[in-house]
Amino acid sequence: MQSMTSRLAVAAALCLFPITAVHAEESDEDNRTIVVTGEAAVTLDTKAGGSRLNITPLENPASIQILPGDLIRARGDFTTQEAISRAAGVTDQASSGNGGLALSARGFTGLNSVMRLYDGLQMVVAAGTMTFPFDTWTVDRIEVLGGASSVLYGSGAIGGAVNVVPLRPDMIDTRQKARIGVGTYGSFRAAVDSTGPIADNLGYRISASRNAAGGWSDRGESKSLAISAALRFEPTDTLSFTLSQDYGDQNPANVSAIPLINGEFDRSLRFRNYNFLDADLNYKDSWTQFKAEWAPSEQFSVRTTLYYLDSDRRWHSAGSPTYVPATNQVRRTGGTDLTHDLKQYGGNLTANLSTPIGSMTNTLAVGGELTHVNFKHVYWVSQATTLIDIDGKSPGVFIPTPGGYSYINRFLTDQVSLFAEDRLEITPELSVVAGLRWDHFKVDRLERLTGVTSNATFEPFSWRVGAVYALTPAFSFYAQYSTATDPPGSIGNMSASAQKMQLMSGRQIEAGLKHVFPGNKGEITFAAYRIVKNDLLVPVLDQPGLTQQVGQQSSKGLEMAITWTPSERLRFDVNGAILDAQYDDFWETVGGVAISRAGNRPTSVPVRLANFWAMWEAVPGWTLRAGLRYVGDRYADNANTIKLAPYVLADGGINWRLNERFAVDLRVSNIFDKFYFPQGGSVIALSPAPPRTAELTLNVSF
């Protein structure tokens, strides 16, 4: 048998990169993706996240969307943000300040309200930042759970949760694949992947992805590296161990926002960059994981995971630019040199037991989790104000001034969690699913320069109960009630004032249906929901400078997603969302005066969303694909005075399969070169989205 070393040597020597082709009834692992017909169009019968009970979305009283990795790559989505934003009701809230991984879902925005997970494990948010995972090359699937999810994953999931599941070793077949690609603005991509058995009970997988670009804006260069490696050992049929190491190193384009000019955005400034000449962004993430699974019978199983996450991040950037009409220049107030050093480690244990209760089947999952986070936050701010020309050609460099200030803070967060879920099959058609979770957070804060310390303890309790009625094995109705909590700021670096507050509470009621089409030709899901979030922070009206937690925010909406494969060579994916989100009780201090924002829509939240995607193998070997994305209007400020126009994006591509091993893929994004802003949050400057780009990729499998 060929050794693992020689296999990897062959993969590295080829140094090629595949985007998968689309062909009926064939596998992505050998350069042809199962995305057109049969079970490939169905995810509702896949055992996935959204529960610890090892049940399918059809059996779960919750909204769960599963994005298979082969479909993601077939569409040409290179980043997890691109892929996730094609799910129903989800929008991308990327920015350099949050590491580019923040999302908006069901009217709630940011990493403190829409949780990110990796392989089912929560990555604790500190300073509103998350930087991993980002590359879809190593992704097996992405699971999007809509609405209040704290009962599963803890505080910080009122709007929903997204779980990225990585590829892991194949214990049966040996396969390698690779791709290499070039594109507009000097983009370059290369990746390899190799998996298979080393021995009868030992398998491996190693993947690497390298991306670089000259950038579409001034001084907009970027590069990234993602590596994933794993070994799986199965000493018996009932016992397995998996050791994995995942690594990411990113230097995103450090491009500034562009300022409003006379209250409008000037398209001619689209490619301008007002950041410092020596501006820098760098994120390094390392995730080590050991997983053990024991299933001595179909009725009983135990799973445990130990992990360690190390994240180092740096921002070296100018402040937001403001237009100065008198001189036709741009003013930059301040600049930052900011570093994060985050270390998170912990483990969890879950036991599943299935036993009869009379004539009914009952499945129970119980477990616990321990987490420790050590976060160091070093921040230097320059108070210097600089003026540069509107063309941004002479941006200058970051120069610390005596007027600046700095701080070094260290945060320690310890979390203990206990959880339980249960599913009772009352009849073959009717089942009830319930869950509860208790968390204990202890947060310690130390200001290293002053020696001031503060600490707090939180003990949130979340629960849910729901029912599923299966009209047929392929058609079910469901309803659920669930609760959740969000922290008043990132749990990993709570300020001294936030530590004195309570967690924000939320509740959701949801109902819907799920149906698999006859012959596995597709599926449809529908959900209706209402979410209410309490204890928002608002100013005390008659005491300037003081705040209290009495605010409320709510949302209600409808979501629908359809996958349909009318023939072996044609596939359609369509989804949409209608949303009504508002502040019910919320005040904002403007110029020292408290102003009510009740009835206003939260920033960056659209009221209409839709996605369309089609894949058609027009003639054997040639697959055409086209996608449309509609995002409705959003507001850039809490006052709802600056409205961002709705936009429609068109993406497309052609895949030519030369033979069983080689394929060429052309991908075009933002075909009509739409000028738009993906998110709000500032009244003086916003960041435009990328213009039209194209990439040509060569793919190989062996």
Image: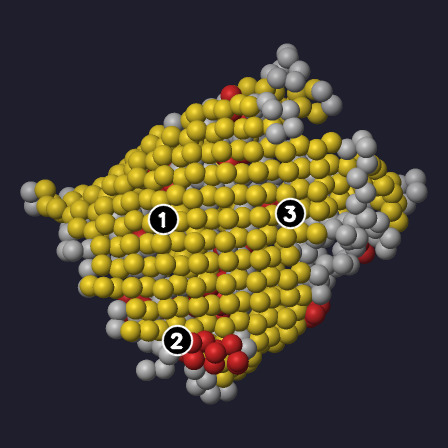
- Secondary structure beneath label 3: strand
Q: Tell me where residue 529 sits by quadrant.
A: top left
Whether residue 467 is situated above or below residue 649 in the rendered picture:
above
Closer to the camera in the image, 295 or 157: 295
Q: Looking at the image, is mark 2 or mark 3 earlier in the sequence? A: 2
Whether residue 259 is situated above or below residue 176 in the rendered picture:
above
Reading the image, the residue beneath label 3 is 314
Reading the image, the residue beneath label 1 is 306
CA separation, marks 2 and 3? 37 Å
The outermost residue toward the bottom is 659
User: What amino acid is at disc 2?
Assistant: Met
Pinpoint residue 554: horizontal percent, then vertical percent. Answer: 49, 33
Q: Residue at x 71, y 68 (%)?
A: 185
Q: Which residue is drawn at 69% across and 39% down?
A: 682
The tag on residue 530 is none
CA separation, marks 2 and 1? 26 Å
Closer to the camera in the image, 428 or 92: 92
User: What amino acid is at disc 3?
Assistant: Arg
- Secondary structure beneath label 1: strand
The outermost residue toward the right is 327
Pinpoint residue 455: horizontal percent, then vertical percent. Answer: 50, 24
User: Which label lies toward us, 2 or 3?
Assistant: 2
